[in-house]
Amino acid sequence: MINLREKILTYGVSTLKDEELLAVIIGNGTKKNSVLDLGRKIVYNSDGLDLNLDQLMAFNGIGVAQACKVLAAIELGTRKVESDTLSDEVVSIDDVGKHLINRIGHAPQEKLVAVYLNNGYHVIDEKVIFVGTIDQATVHPRDILREALRISATQIIIAHNHPNGSMMFSKNDQAFSLRLRKCCHLIGINLLDHLIITKKSYSSLKSLNLI
């Protein structure tokens, strides 16, 4: 632990590996496993640290107190990422895609997000429109366009995450996008793209010539 603290003080906390960060949070190991070994086991046996209290406590050496500390640290990191906003500078589709990987890529439920831009590709606002399964029965273009008209946005990028990690678009995704594009055209707004977001990457309907 002392070495890890010295590493933070000398090189910064960003230089620590995931298992080292966990070791700092957990604090102590067991007779059989050092705290760093315990951190390695947790990282190796978890999918991106997607763990609940019971799963954490299943590791020998992790009690209620340590498990709560780890969960609190993960939640704090999640909230920090979700509070991050896009730059006020000119943004590209790739900028938006990478930003949304951090913001909604790890969400356990589907989230539909709209990013509103002006003619100069500057972000005006970003809003979660809907949480749940996205289809034409649950989401209407007016839910997205109402905000665009309120803030005088002239361009929109929409995106939603796939918690199962699939990069594939469904027929519903394409049908909704085409319907939204038609509604956007009627009121002079440009639908730039519809992105599918996963934990590690994103895909684009526009790049696949689906809209």
Image: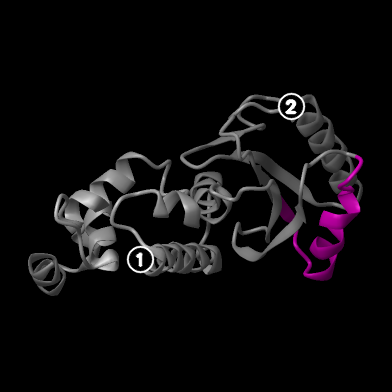
User: Can residue 125 be seen?
Assistant: yes
Give 26 or 103, whichever is nearer the viewer. Answer: 26
Residue 35: x and y in percent read 19, 58
Under tag 1, what secondary structure? helix
Judging depth in this view, the residue of 36 and 148 nearest the camera is 36
For marks 1 and 2, the one nearer the N-term is 1
Which residue: 72% across, 53% down?
Answer: 155
Asked if residue 76 lies left or right of residue 37, the reply is right
Is residue 9 found left or right of 211 in the rendered image?
left
Residue at the extreme bottom of the image, as rendered: 9
For the residue marked with disc 2, what is the amino acid? Ser
> Which dot marks residue 32?
none
Which three-letter amino acid code belongs to the residue tagged 1?
Gln
The residue indicated by pointer 2 is 170
Residue 159 coordinates in the image, percent (x, y): 67, 46
Front residue of 135/29: it is 29
Q: Quadrant of residue 44?
A: top left
Q: What residue appears at the point 85 percent right and 52 percent down from the top-left corner? A: 188
Magenta span of residues? 137-156
Q: Is residue 201 magenta?
A: no
Q: Is residue 159 left or right of residue 91?
A: right
Image x and y of residue 153, in percent? 75, 62
The residue beneath circle 1 is 66
Front one among 68 and 108: 68
Reply above or below: 72 against 59. below
